[in-house]
Image (spheres, rainbow, N blue to C red):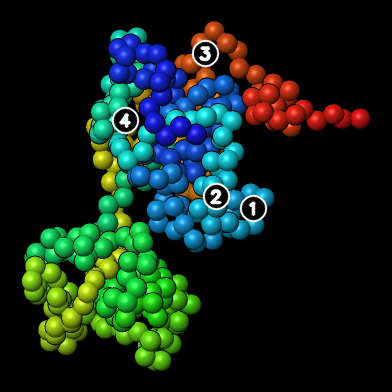
Amino acid sequence: MDNTSNPAVSTPSNVIEADAVIVGAGPVGLFQVFELGLLEIKAHVIDSLPVVGGQCVELYPDKPIYDIPAVPVCTGQELTDNLLKQIEPFEPTFHLNQEVTLVQRRADGRFDLETSLGTKFITKTIFIAAGVGSFQPRTLKVDGIEAFEGSQVFYRVKDPSRFEGRNLVICGGGDSALDWALALAGKAESVILLHRREDFRAAPASVAKMKEMCDNYEMQLIIGQVTGIETKDDKLAEIKVTGADGVTRRLPLDDLLVFFGLSPKLGPIADWGLEIERKQLKVMDTEKFETNVPGIFAVGDINTYPGKKKLILSGFHEAALAAFGAAPYIFPEKKIHMQYTTTSPKLHKILGVESPVFD
């Protein structure tokens, strides 16, 4: 699949004319590609992350998912890989590492859409499948710490081998902090888990394993909070940790990993004139999952309606109905008939598979 701009002819020449633009490349956004493809609607997909997969890949690529129909268990990465394989026949165009900054209704009823990298579209429909918005890590609020972000202070782990042989302090009490503390213990020179209280928000099995490793001197747990830093030769050398007893101690380290969770932000979506309810996009009905702006649809965790359940499988259902709801904007003269992938020769041709012969 092409990950560059679509070379389709458009006016002006630097603007991409599209039938559908999907904002969000998570599982629901990817399945939206599939449902549109069955209706012969080609999609462009935009995501602020540098990779496809959304939350599933960014937050828990190796965590098991158990509620995908007919798939007893798969990881977030496996789900993403399978969806990418499923949508291959439709050749979507991905525009990654950029977010939508402008959406405006045109006089002809279509939309002008522009991204943070200057990619411009004129599109008939927009599907917002942006999860709960773009995720920003909750940062450590200590004077001077921002100077070391990306060099010694990390809010995400992209390359675990980077921390081998290093003296690490890992802050947090949730699953991410515990998971990485357990994963890096034994590979790093030392691992200290720093949490502000005795109670943890992580899986009980992870907490039990962590305490067992502490008892075996494979890692260390300290209850306290980072209240300051010390530098040496322009590098982060120590952190100041204030314990529950009020005493502040110095803790030498090579790297500091901080997992205080991620804060979802709607970002520019909040300025598009869409009706918002508790930081979610309100859809007008559950027949089409269209927002208050005709031609703009919201599917997945970003939307809200009576009875809404934030499940991937619910997002898949919403994507199917949104595709049918959008078809009249794209093919105003065409009557859309419901067809089944099991029996429809036309869909078999679209999918590039042979039609089965029944006796």
Q: Nearer the viewer, residue 83 or 72?
A: 83
- What's the CA distance linking mark 4 and mark 3? 24 Å
Q: Amino acid at mark 4?
A: Leu
Residue located beneath label 2 in the image: 79
Q: Nearer the viewer, mark 4 or mark 3?
A: 3
Quick one: label 1, few (<14), some, or many (20+) residues within 10 Å? few
Q: Quadrant of residue 259?
A: bottom left
Q: Earlier in the sequence, mark 4 or mark 3?
A: 4
Task: Residue 141 in the image: state x and y as whole percent.
Answer: 15, 64
Q: Amino acid at mark 1?
A: Val
Q: Secondary structure at mark 2?
A: helix
- Is the C-beta separation of discs 4 and 3 under 8 Å? no
Quick one: label 2, few (<14), some, or many (20+) residues within 10 Å? many
Q: Secondary structure at mark 1?
A: loop
Left or right of 108? Residue 312 is right
Residue located beneath label 1 in the image: 71
Q: Looking at the image, which residue is at 54% across and 41% down?
A: 84
- Is the C-beta separation of discs 2 and 1 under 8 Å? yes
Task: Residue 116 in the image: state x and y as whole percent.
Answer: 25, 34
Q: Quadrant of the C terminus?
A: top right
Residue located beneath label 4 in the image: 274
Q: Looking at the image, which residue is at 36% across and 20% down?
A: 16
Residue located beneath label 3 in the image: 331
Q: Nearer the viewer, residue 176 or 270?
A: 176
Q: Is residue 216 above or below residue 201?
A: below
What is the residue that sits farthest to the right in this orientation? 359
